[in-house]
Amino acid sequence: MKNFALMGAAGYIAPRHLEAIKQTNNDLVAACDPHDSVGILDRYFNQVSYFKEFERFDRHVEKLRLTNDKSKIDYVSICSPNYLHDAHIRFALRVGANVICEKPLVINPWNIEMLSELEELHSRKINTVLQLRLHPAIKELKKKIDSAPVGKVHDINLTYLTSRGPWYHYSWKGDVEKSGGLVTNIGIHFFDVLQWIFGEPDRSEVHVSNDNIVAGYMELKKAKVKWCLSVDKENLPEDVKKKGQTTYRSITVDGEEIEFSGGFTDLHTEVYKEVLAGRGFGLNDSKTSIEIVHGIRNADVIGKNENSHEIIKN
């Protein structure tokens, strides 16, 4: 049994990490979050040392490391806002723990090099959550593309529309400096699997970019990709709205739909199993997708088509 600490315990994604720690028969020893709405901890573990202040959490974890071998932290799971990931990873390494960090591992690609040096210095492993790589439909697609004739270039359409209320833009997620923007916060998983399956990018264009929608075109080694991401519920297809659904995911490859709407809830547990088996996704696995979204975030917008409905339609 391994001992875990959790940073960002009050966050949206924390329950999936709590479930994964529980399902892999490990123990959560300590948790930290500046927001104290953390009653969900009791659903999974009832003896967690919780700290509202990071400084007290830091002191507690250091004390465990120095005085109690049985309770020292083996892994720190990081679910904090994106802009804090780099600092929290450094903290985890400093206290002698391995890391399991939510996406994006860091916002800017140049931070990866320093983390690589620290990883080696502390003899610990930084793992990230790239759970879509473990989705059965995505794994099957990769097998299919890997076995395709050499030189074949595929036509891809990626659409991810997820409804978010006004809170989104007022929270840290709506702050580009803190989240990396829309393309980083909700899109990085999709860009990761695309480059993982179809190769590194050769060309990238951004056709529309605002607070609610980002869309563009990309050429990968084995694919030409039209992509669109949005948090505006008005962009959802009418049939999706009528069903009362708030999210629409679609990836088509050469006109064939890849169905992967289901099977998301257990993927964090699968990630934890891979990490604990020594097969976690590390810094090198994360690098290309972080470079892709950084490039999109800083790219000039080509054209002046601000009609999001037309972008999605086309």
Image (spheres, rainbow, N blue to C red):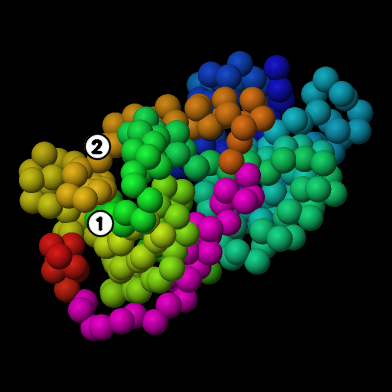
Question: x and y percent of residue 256 in the render?
Answer: 19, 44
Say left or right for 224 vs 60: left
- Point 41% across, 47% down: residue: 197
- Point 40% across, 42% down: residue: 146
Compared with 269, 160 (above or below) is below
Callout 1 secondary element: strand
Q: Is residue 242 visible?
A: yes
Question: x and y percent of residue 301 in the render?
Answer: 34, 80
Q: Is residue 155 magenta?
A: no
- Rendered image: mark on residue 155: 1
Question: x and y percent of residue 93 in the render?
Answer: 77, 45
Q: Nearer the viewer, residue 225 or 299?
A: 225
Q: Amino acid at mark 1?
A: Asp
Per the rendered image, the range of residues in magenta is: 282-306
Q: Nearer the viewer, residue 141 or 56?
A: 141
| Image quarter hosting the C terminus | bottom left
- Point 35% across, 74% down: residue: 205
Q: Amino acid at mark 2?
A: Glu
Lower sequence index among marks 1 and 2 = 1
Q: Say which residue label 2 marks.
A: 259
Question: x and y percent of residue 290 in the render?
Answer: 53, 60
Say left or right for 120 vs 307: right
